[in-house]
Image: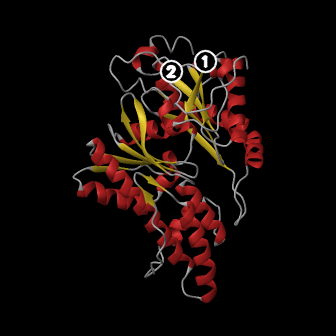
Amino acid sequence: GGDRRAGAEDSGRMLALGIEGSANKLGVGIVREDGSILSNVRHTYITPPGTGFLPKETAEHHRQHIVRLVKEAMKEAAISPSDLDCICYTKGPGMGGPLRVGAVVARMLSQMWGKPLVGVNHCIAHIEMGRVVTGADDPVALYVSGGNTQVIAFAQGRYQIFGETIDIAVGNCLDRFARVVHLSNDPSPGYNIEQSAKVEDPQFVELPYCVKGMDVSFAGILSNIEEVAEAKLKAGECRVGDLCFSLQETVFGMLVETTERAMAHCGNQEVMAVGGVGCNKRLHEMLVQMAEQRGGKAYTTDDRYCIDNGAMIAYTGLVMFRHGHLTPLQEATCTQRFRTDDVLINWRTENAPAPTPAPKQSVWCPARPEGT
């Protein structure tokens, strides 16, 4: 593969393999620097209705399937290890056990194949993949998934968080409600809520609407709808579909409100939904409506790119690699907490400096006694 790649670095033909495994989806993707996807294979850990996925079992699922997925991705892309320029993996945020599986395999491949490593922030990968797929230039990103809910915009060299959940993620709220009414986890609880919400002549059940400034809160809504569901379904006062409809309308209304405020604050006319919940067609409708009223444009992607996948990690890692981001082997760890604004986005600023570690957020703590 060496000769074919002569001068490849200049023509945007660099290749990366990306490994994503921060939650119940395990993905391996191979991507070129121009965003063309050579392969993007995925396997989801699906649990029985009424249950969620736990870190230990999810990590075990990833261990069972990851080597096969790497082989499949390489075969589908029709490349050999020598064609790759770097190995990218999800550094965080996510579940500790599942993340560790991806990090271990990435380190192993890096040493076996002699390729550099790039640890990627999962949230930033969603945004960068969304931008390359939709062609959005500088959108406000509504990042909504089972583990994250953030309203993000690019400012001062970083993806700044303008609003976020103060307790659980919107996807977690939807998933846990799906458990209460025993909806299937196949292909995902959120998808089945979306389908159930399409009942004829839906009845709106009023739920708490929790917007706190730019932030949102879903834990109280979940507690409330759990009680309401039990009482009303038993009394035959409403259907499961009515509850799904009401929950979607309420939580999506909250998200669109805070996203619109971020657009107004940033003077931004583009909005983009990313993350697993970003597949939801009703959320798309609401974002499109809001953006059009503002004279702006809403961008959405389908489930190939919204839902966690390896290609978004490979693409973002490749862009980072091109701009000097490298993860030395001894630092190729993973972390459950990794803020979106911790990474210097030097590929979106002219003449940006090489990355230095992000400044730690200043948190007050008592001074330690001398000599400890």
Residue placed under numbered mark 2 in the picture:
321
> Taking 297 as reference, is 366 above or below it?
above
Is residue 229 shown left or right of residue 98? left
Residue 224 or residue 292, whichever sits in front? 224
Query: Disc number at residue 368?
Result: none
Helix, strand, or loop for circle 2? helix
Label 1's element? Answer: loop
- Amino acid type at mark 1: Pro
Q: Which residue is drawn at 69% across and 58% down?
A: 52
Residue 114, given in percent of the width and then of the height, sits at 66, 15
- Protein image colouring: secondary structure
Where residue 302 appears, x then y in whole percent? 46, 51
Determine whether 300 is above or below 16 in the image. Answer: below
Residue found 77% across the figure and 46% down from its top: 56
Q: In this view, does 10 lie above or below 199?
A: above
To which residue does mark 1 refer?
Answer: 116
In this orientation, does residue 31 appear?
A: no
Sequence-wise, which precedes: disc 1 or disc 2? Answer: 1
Answer whether labels 1 and 2 touch (C-beta < 8 Å).
yes
Closest to the observer: 348 or 255? 255
Residue 291 x, y percent position in the rendering: 29, 54
- Label 2 packing within 10 angstroms: few (<14), some (14-19), many (20+): many
Q: How crowded is mark 1: few (under 14 residues within 10 Å), some or many (20 or more)?
A: many
Q: How far apart are marks 1 and 2 (CA)?
A: 9 Å
